[in-house]
Image (spheres, rainbow, N blue to C red):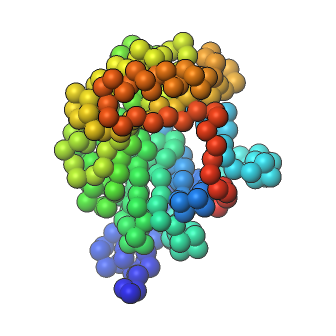
């Protein structure tokens, strides 16, 4: 078996940035079912009014004892990981895959180095992104770094709805999504069903947009979970399933996630 080089040797050999380069990664969670890491990046280029991170900056699946421990931490003062610290986590957990989520990973300049690190350890990487910054230049760079999959969270195709929810136009998102289909990376999409905003009809429009590019692109529909001070209620499982039926008029592969779908296996807070 090939002996893997440490991130320090790799950086030195390639002339890339020091192992002490600090990422924007502030939280890492291990899902032992499937041996996967979920990696949280600090910061976002959207201001989504219903973002769950406004309720808590920590993964909503971690055990209650971890929630109590982390509740005393100031997220603004929390130290983010360096590349070498991330490498130690990868080695210690021996994971098979990693989801790079958020916040929004594309706001982190070190994202290509993060992907390269995972690639060297044989870890399958999935980028979960709003797609706003994922233009041709960045897409090409991340593909070259070894990114395996991209999942774009399409909030809405109706620009008025998108701007109301995120504060930004969706034009770049939709344009970038079309370009992503031309890359060699696997592409999928997700959206959130929000009663009173992104409803069944809008979800069907999202599915139709995706189908206009390729009917085989998978779409997952998540049921919105209400957060304090937001104006929308949680989506019911039946509402999510109805949206799935509408999306299946256009797409071959539609799945969903709602409050009654259980999490398999154990969830471990790896950092902090």
Give residue 45's position: percent from left, percent from top.
Answer: 44, 35
Q: Residue at x 36, y 76 (%)?
A: 10
Compared across the picture, whether 140 is left or right of 258 comes to left
Relative depth, front residue between 209 and 164? 209
Give residue 14's position: percent from left, percent from top.
Answer: 29, 74
* Label tally: 0
Above-or-below relation of 117 to 149: below
Above-or-below relation of 110 to 46: below
Q: In which quadrant of the rendered view does residue 257 lie?
A: top right
Q: Residue at x 43, y 66 (%)?
A: 123
Q: Residue at x 34, y 57 (%)?
A: 147
Image quadrant occupied by the N terminus: bottom left
Give residue 117's position: percent from left, percent from top.
Answer: 41, 67
Compared across the picture, whether 48 is left or right of 253 comes to right
Regarding residue 88, the answer to whether it shows in the image is no
Above-or-below relation of 99 to 229: below
Image quadrant occupied by the C terminus: bottom right
**Residue at the farthest left position:** 182
Compared across the picture, whether 210 is left or right of 100 comes to left
Give residue 237's position: percent from left, percent from top.
Answer: 59, 26
Above-or-below relation of 104 to 31: above
Q: In which quadrant of the rendered view does residue 236 lie?
A: top right
Regarding residue 158, the answer to whether it shows in the image is yes
Relative depth, front residue between 92 and 238? 238
Relative depth, front residue between 140 and 62? 62
């Amino acid at each position: 078996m090939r002996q893997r080089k440490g991130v320090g040797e790799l950086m030195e050999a390639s002339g890339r940035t020091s192992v002490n380069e600090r990422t924007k990664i502030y939280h890492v969670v291990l899902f032992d079912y499937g041996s996967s890491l979920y990696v949280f990046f600090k910061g976002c280029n959207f201001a989504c009014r219903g973002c769950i991170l406004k309720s808590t900056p920590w993964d909503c699946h971690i055990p209650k004892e971890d929630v109590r421990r982390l509740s005393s931490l100031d997220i603004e003062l929390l130290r983010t990981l360096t590349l070498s610290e991330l490498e130690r986590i990868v080695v210690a957990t021996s994971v098979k895959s990693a989801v790079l989520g958020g916040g929004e990973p594309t706001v982190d300049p070190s994202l290509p180095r993060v992907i390269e690190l995972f690639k060297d350890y044989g870890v399958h990487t999935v980028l979960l992104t709003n797609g706003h910054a994922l233009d041709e230049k960045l897409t090409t760079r991340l593909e070259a770094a070894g990114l395996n999959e991209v999942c774009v969270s399409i909030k809405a195709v109706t620009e008025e709805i998108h701007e109301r929810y995120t504060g930004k136009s969706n034009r770049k998102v939709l344009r970038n999504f079309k370009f992503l289909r031309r890359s060699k990376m696997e592409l999928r999409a997700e959206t959130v069903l929000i009663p009173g905003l992104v409803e069944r009809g809008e979800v069907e429009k999202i599915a139709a947009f995706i189908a206009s590019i390729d009917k085989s692109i998978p779409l997952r529909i998540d049921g919105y979970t209400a957060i304090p001070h937001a104006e929308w209620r949680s989506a019911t499982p039946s509402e999510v399933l109805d949206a799935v039926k509408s999306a299946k008029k256009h797409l071959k592969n539609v799945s969903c996630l709602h409050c009654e779908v259980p999490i398999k296996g154990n969830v471990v807070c790896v950092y902090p």
